[in-house]
Image (cartoon, coloured by chain):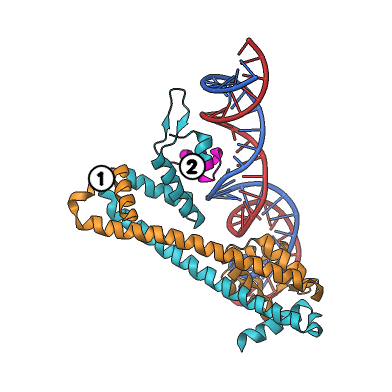
Chain colours: A cyan, B orange, C blue, D red
Amino acid sequence: MYSAKEAAEMTGLTTATLRYYEKEQLLPAIERTEQRYRQYSDTDIEWINMIQCLRMANVPIRSIREYILLLTQGGKTILQRRLMVQEYIDDLHSQMVNLQNALALTEKKLVFYEELLQSPSAQDLTYLEEWNLFKSKGES
Amino acid sequence: MYSAKEAAEMTGLTTATLRYYEKEQLLPAIERTEQRYRQYSDTDIEWINMIQCLRMANVPIRSIREYILLLTQGGKTILQRRLMVQEYIDDLHSQMVNLQNALALTEKKLVFYEELLQSPSAQDLTYLEEWNLFKSKGES
DNA sequence: ATAAACTATGAAGTGCGCTTCAAAGCAAGA
DNA sequence: TCTTGCTTTGAAGCGCACTTCATAGTTTAT
């Protein structure tokens, strides 16, 4: 069992964030000592790591709560949970596409700047000229 | 040239968002009619599309503004801009890793539920039992 | 001429995900 | 014992990215 501070250190979150997650019902059953001090178990820590994994992929608190709520309601909610997980996966895939689009754009931009730095004469462009030059590269 | 409403329809944003972007200096030079009505050019529309592409990849308004500010300051800022673009690319890559981690987790979860639905006897688990079962699958 | 539709502006409001604060209780070492 | 550090709580605050509102001017169709 770990204290609030230990759990925070282990997960890389702050104690405030852990309390916030608990308030938002992302951590349904954190034990307490007689003096109401929190006691995080190894399972709690793993659970928090899972939450972090989802949060880093922009899964909203609300969705995680919803899932956990179903989970605590037992086996009869399996179908709903499977559907939910499927929706997460779809969302993650579409985020992936967005990232790839932005990556394609920025990588083209980088190549463009590398080229520009090779020809010192071409460096005195207004931003509109630069934009048009960049576009014409993209079209070819 | 397009009116506010037309530009909004073409980009899928609202007129309010376009005004907000302008206020935040993401659209430095939108023309106006004599009555101060905005007139969006084709270049403006393309520019807005580019901003949308970055926003969908979670690039903050602040960063986009910073980049555009350098851009309007001309050729002497090319080195800084190249550095900035490189930093975007790094950030996008690390976001990609986060997405892939979450995707791996949720896809494993989905397989787990598919299996669970095949064995009706195993569906009456508490959430802790389910979690432990899921973990044991992952370790194998 | 008048109503409906569009545009402008600044200011205030919203939802999210934390973070910080204030006041108080508990714990461990010098 | 006293101080330092950790913990508790509820409430308030914050930064971001919009969104909505109130008020007022313009344009267009009937």
In magenta, the rendered stretch is A9-27
Residue A98 at x, y percent in the picture: 52, 69
Q: Which mark is residue A113?
A: none
Distance from disc 1 to disc 2, alpha carbons, whole Å, reads 24 Å
Q: Does dot 2 land on a helix, a strand or a loop?
A: helix
Q: Which mark is residue B125?
A: 1
Residue A69, above or below A105: above
Q: Is residue A61 magenta?
A: no
| Observer able to see residue B36 | no
Q: Does dot 1 land on a helix, a strand or a loop?
A: loop
Query: Which one is in front, B39 or A30?
Result: A30
For the N terminus of chain B, the image quarter is: bottom right
Q: Chain of mark 1?
A: B
Residue, far bottom: A140
Quarter location, residue B50? bottom right
**Horizontal arrangement in the rendering, residue D14 relative to residue A125 (left or right):** left
Residue A36, above or below A19: above
Residue C15 at x, y percent in the picture: 53, 50
Q: Amino acid at mark 2?
A: Tyr
What secondary structure is the stretch in magenta mostly built from? helix
Residue B117 at x, y percent in the picture: 23, 56
Q: Is residue A18 magenta?
A: yes
Is the residue marked by circle 2 packed among few (<14), some (14-19), or many (20+) residues within 10 Å?
Answer: some
Residue at image position (47%, 49%) is A61
Residue A69 at x, y percent in the picture: 36, 45
| Observer able to see residue B48 | yes
Q: Amino acid at mark 1?
A: Leu
Query: Which one is in front, B64 or B13?
Result: B64
**Horizontal arrangement in the rendering, residue B100 relative to residue B31 (left or right):** left
Query: Which residue in the structure is indicated by mark 2?
Result: A21
